Amino acid sequence: MVRAYNPLSVDELGRNAARALMEYPADALPPTEAFDGAGVYTLHHTGDFPAYAAIGLDVPIYVGKADPPGRRQGRTQASTTVLHSRLQEHAGSIEAATNLALSDFRCRWLVLDPVWIGLTEQVLLAQYQPLWNVVVDGFGNHDPGAGRRNQRRSRWDTLHPGRVWASHLRDRGETASDVIAAIEAHRGHQ
């Protein structure tokens, strides 16, 4: 039997960053003070929305990342508030929902060197399987623009109506009750 441990393996480095993020206390969404940096974040539901009531602060309902601008083109800015801005965008989506209260959400975030952002997000997604990433997809969507309005409404927007731009998208053929049933089925497989 081989017992090996490499504390500097890529997987272990990703787990270390994920652990560091989850050790921070959950804070208001969005954070009250702006900060510089790109990185990863988690959103946590603490309210009484029936489908989410059992989640709590230890398990994120959503995991995301904010890469520095220009990263896909091989150029980045030295200073950017992209992570804080992303959390503000998410707060706006939650505020727009007719059946959610922003005060029922908390967040954690961790500024990271860009090389660790994607890896840490993958570790968090694999570990927690957050509902809004895995079952109730579409929370992180942006307005697709008038030329692409033939897309279907996301499960998130079906369960949590209120984003004006999402109301113009095609119906997805599922009701809010269907989405809640999918959440319950997901929980049954965990």
Image (cartoon, rainbow, N blue to C red):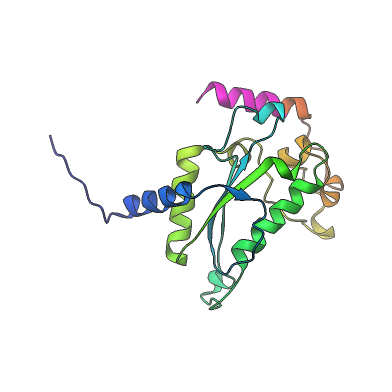
In this rendering, position of residue 92 left or right of residue 69: right
Quarter containing the N terminus = top left
Range of residues picked out in magenta? 179-190
Residue 6 magenta-drawn?
A: no
Q: Position of residue 108 (x, y in %)?
A: 55, 51
In x, y percent, where is residue 43?
60, 46
| Residue ID at (60%, 27%) | 54
Position of residue 80 in the picture relative to residue 101 (left or right)? left
Q: Main secondary structure of the magenta part?
A: helix
- 76 vs 155, left or right, is left
> In the image shown, does 106 or 149 lie closer to the viewer?
106
The quadrant where residue 52 appears: top right
Q: Quadrant of residue 86?
A: bottom right
Q: Residue furthest top?
A: 188
Q: Is residue 156 above or below residue 86?
A: above
Q: Residue at x 74, y 46 (%)?
A: 94
Q: Percent position (x, y) of residue 74? A: 51, 75
Query: With 178 as the anchor, is 96 left or right in this view?
Result: right
Picture layout, residue 39 above or below residue 25: below
Residue 39: give x, y in percent of width and height.
52, 61
